[in-house]
Amino acid sequence: MFLRDLFFQDFWLKIFSLALAVLIWITVSFAIRNENIVTSGVTVNAPSRIFYVPVLMVSAAADVRQFHVQPNRVEVTVRGEAEVLGRLLDKDIRVLVDLTDIESARGVRKKVEVSTPPGVTHVKVFPEDVEIVVPPKL
């Protein structure tokens, strides 16, 4: 009696649950095996290229001090389609440091922000932050 109830009580609900579990398993298994996983419009196995890009500084218009960054160039690794990367130049990639909230301080480090053209994704930036050399405010 117990075994019969175990299998046949709510039989259609159990069959539906089993079918749903198999469907989920097939979907996840297919997604894992798919080698061309798309991440933000660029495939993961797309070719990559390294650029050495100068760091641009953004500061308030009223701030007339001359900031310096160390290092003044960073290594940016980008990924995209081969023909897009072939046409890409250093000037197409922008590396910015926002200095609008910097006051007089020593040893300040700020994270760099990278922007790339459509179809190109930045993968890595080295170094990720730069040291700001701030002259004293007059």
Image (cartoon, rainbow, N blue to C red):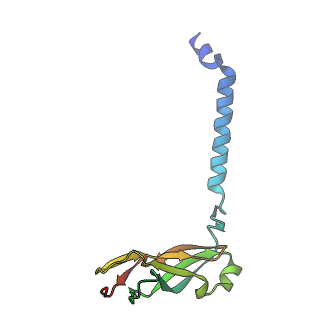
Q: Position of residue 65 (x, y in %)?
A: 38, 88
Residue 58 percent coordinates (x, y): 47, 81
80 shown above or below 54: above
Looking at the rendered image, the quarter that the N terminus falls into is: top right
In the picture provided, is 36 more to the left or to the right than 57? right
- Which is nearer the eye, 101 or 30? 101
Label tally: 0
Image location (x, y in percent) of residue 134: 34, 85
Residue occupying image coordinates x 59% and y 15%:
3
Quadrant of res 78? bottom right
| Residue at left offset 41%, top offset 84% | 63
User: Which residue sits furthest bottom?
Assistant: 66
User: In this picture, is 42 found above or below 129?
Assistant: above
Q: Position of residue 115 (x, y in %)?
A: 57, 76
- Does residue 93 appear to the left or right of 36 in the view shown? left
**Residue nearer the viewer, 38 or 19:** 38
Report which quarter residue 42 is drawn in: bottom right
> In the rendered view of the protein, which quadrant contains the C terminus?
bottom left
Q: Residue at x 39, y 74 (%)?
A: 101
Front residue of 1/83: it is: 83
Outermost residue to the top = 1
Q: Is residue 80 above or below residue 1?
A: below
Along the viewing direction, whichever of 32 and 76 lies nearer the viewer: 76
- Residue 68 figure quarter: bottom left
